[in-house]
Image (spheres, helix red, strand yellow):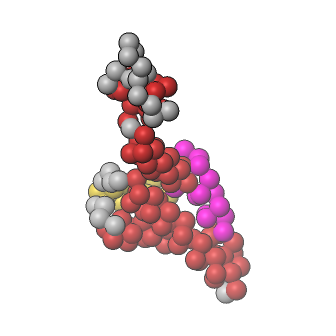
């Protein structure tokens, strides 16, 4: 687990995210970092499981250590609340939402017609001009 957290601790500053604190709970070590953009958070979230993935290569020298890292990698990538997989999934969805927002506009993504400056939801989604009277 220390190697896993070290992956997060080394990666965060490399992508420009500051670490606030490192701690120990009943589930193990954890890090708290500043909020960053979703693409950088995705990289930091996947850094820990990536370290475990690399450590699976120790299988030849220590079967138990390799197996433990295989389990850590697998379960940490599942989108379970509080896991790196859940954080990575949230970052991925946010990146896709921002990409969609840039391509068709924030009103279409939010679904709020008031943000569409008078356009109906359908005209915004279809990228059409609103009919007069809308």
Q: Residue at x 28, y 61 (%)?
A: 18
Residue 2 percent coordinates (x, y): 48, 69
- Report the residue at 50% width, 58% height from top: 28
* Residue at point 42%, 19% (across, down): 131
Task: Tell me if residue 16 can be seen.
Answer: yes
**Of the pair 59 and 78, the residue shown nearer to us:** 78
Nearest to the observer: residue 64 or residue 115: 115
Residue 117 position, x and y percent, is: 32, 25
Asked where in the image residue 56 lies, by quadrant, the reply is: bottom right
Please state the horizontal and vertical placement of residue 20, each as a whole percent of the image. Answer: 29, 57
Which residue corresponds to the image point at 43% horizontal and 70% vertical from the top-left? 6
Name the chief secondary structure element in magenta. helix
| Residue bounds of the magenta highlight | 70-84
Query: Magenta includes 80?
Result: yes
The residue most toward the bottom is 61
Q: Is residue 59 above or below residue 10?
A: below
For residue 74, which quarter of the picture?
bottom right
* Nearer to us in this view, 80 or 42: 42
């Amino acid at each position: 687990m220390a190697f896993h957290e070290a992956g997060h601790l080394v990666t965060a500053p490399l992508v420009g995210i500051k670490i606030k604190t490192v701690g120990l709970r009943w589930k193990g070590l954890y890090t708290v970092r500043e909020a960053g953009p979703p693409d950088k958070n995705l990289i930091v979230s996947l850094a820990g499981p990536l370290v475990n993935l690399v450590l699976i290569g120790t299988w030849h020298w220590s079967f138990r250590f390799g197996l433990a890292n295989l389990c850590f990698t697998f379960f940490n990538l599942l989108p379970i609340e509080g896991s790196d997989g859940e954080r990575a999934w949230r970052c991925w969805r946010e990146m896709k939402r921002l990409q969609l927002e840039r391509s068709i506009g924030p009103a279409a993504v939010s679904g709020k017609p008031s943000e569409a400056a008078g356009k109906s939801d359908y005209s915004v989604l279809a990228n059409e001009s609103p009919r007069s009277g809308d």
